Amino acid sequence: MTKIEYLDLGIQPIANEYVTPGQDKAELFFHLAMGVDDETGMSSLMHVVDSRTVYTDTYAYHSSGSKTMRDHFAAAAKELQDKWNPKTVLEIGSNDGVFLKNFTKSHSIHSIVGVEPCANFAKITEKMDICTFNYFWNEETAVYATDYTGDKFDLVYSANCICHIPDLVETFDAVKSILSESGVFVFEDPTLLDMFKNGSYDQVYVEHVHMFTVCALSRILNKCGLEIIDIEHLDVHGGSNRITVGHLGEHAVNLEAVAGAKTNEIVAGLDLATETFQAKALINANANENAYYAFGRRVMDSRDNLVIKLLELRGDGKRVISYGATAKSTTVFNYCNIGPDMIESIIDNTPSKQGKLSPGMGIPIIAPGDGIKSYIDVAFLGAWNFEKEICKKEAKFLDRGGSFITHVPYVREIAINVKC
Ligand code: TMP
């Protein structure tokens, strides 16, 4: 197994590790680069930071931070409950309970279990009366969970978490060990195909250890005695797949969805592994047409265009902020070397991020207050994946002539005369 590097985003900090002004603790930096595995075809970080350094008791990301995601998880819970009628539910990476709080114990649901390594969030769901194991997901935690319920699980769910776990084989083996015979494992994460289509290289940060393709996932899941039985493409988080998995041979497979998703990836040139299982040879032989290298070049163009745009704005005396202190914007600012001289502050509605500085570049993070201040001309959309929600919330800013800029899918301006 060899990983072939195709994207180098330079030296980067831990994306969600916001800095307290004057803190003694030095920031940790690492080399952020992506490669593709020549056996499985999986895209993963070239250098993985120990999970215990990333998911600490002060972990800042709240899944409930946007209406879009609160609505999304409420709808997901209802849909999955209606479809699978589970008696036992477990979520891997339960965060602040935004998904599990939609389940209520009743005669039909007797166990609702969360697994969450960050103690600050595990405490929140414990208070909501959800049994929460404050551990990383692995085979040991799987045993604790089944010992607790005395039963296997009919629904194992995970959102924006499986792609954070370095060892996928251990992860899937652990899921298999707790899945009831007809149980399903449903997980959703951003996709490599969407990242390539959108030029959204900022999906790559310390937590996104993998960017999934259906082709690569299928291979790894099959090795673990599991198979993909359905796939639904979702708009959230810049384009994600909700993947439903069962024990191998246990369920009918929605061939149209599964084969269709694989075909889309193959057509886009993402599945090097199906062609030769020799990514290295292919990348080197066809560097010019290769989708992976083409993406790498597009990312460099995106960086240059964004920096030029910000320099122009500064030259015109415009005041620029960023909207949403996202892990994604940590990647953009550090890769493009954008600091407080170009973006004066970042507004974010997460109380634990406010008063802190953005990782690496030290841009102050402030509360949104009543919205973007009247003296601000332009806001970079750090949370571009919530473009609609933010444009709606900040309609007054747009009405008075303010504009947003984003680099997705290319560097562009969003103003009142441009439809959001
Ligand atoms: P995410 O893109 O990783 O989900 O992060 C979104 C961040 O943006 C999170 O810190 C919450 C913040 N946010 C706001 O501050 N205001 C908003 O209106 C929205 C939608 C998000």
Image (cartoon, rainbow, N blue to C red):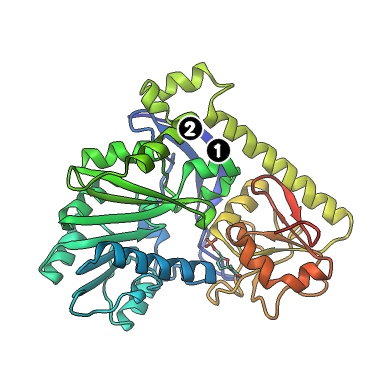
Looking at the picture, tell me which residue is in the foreground, 279 or 331: 279
Residue at 33% of width from left, 48% of height from top?
230
Q: Are marks 1 and 2 in contact (CB under 8 Å)?
A: yes
Report the residue marked by disc 2: 5
Asked whether residue 405 appears in the rendered view, the answer is: yes
* Tag 1 secondary structure: strand
Within 8 Å of ligand 1, the CB of disc 2? no
Q: Ligand 1 falls in which quarter?
A: bottom right
Quadrant of res 252: top left
Which quadrant would the N terminus be assigned to in this image?
top left
Position in image of residue 346 (x %, y %): 67, 66
Asked if residue 320 lies left or right of residue 31, the reply is right
Q: What amino acid is at disc 1? A: Asp
In the rendered view of the protein, which quadrant contains the C terminus? bottom right
Q: Which residue is disc 1 drawn over?
A: 8
From the viewer's side, name the closer residue of 194 and 48.
194
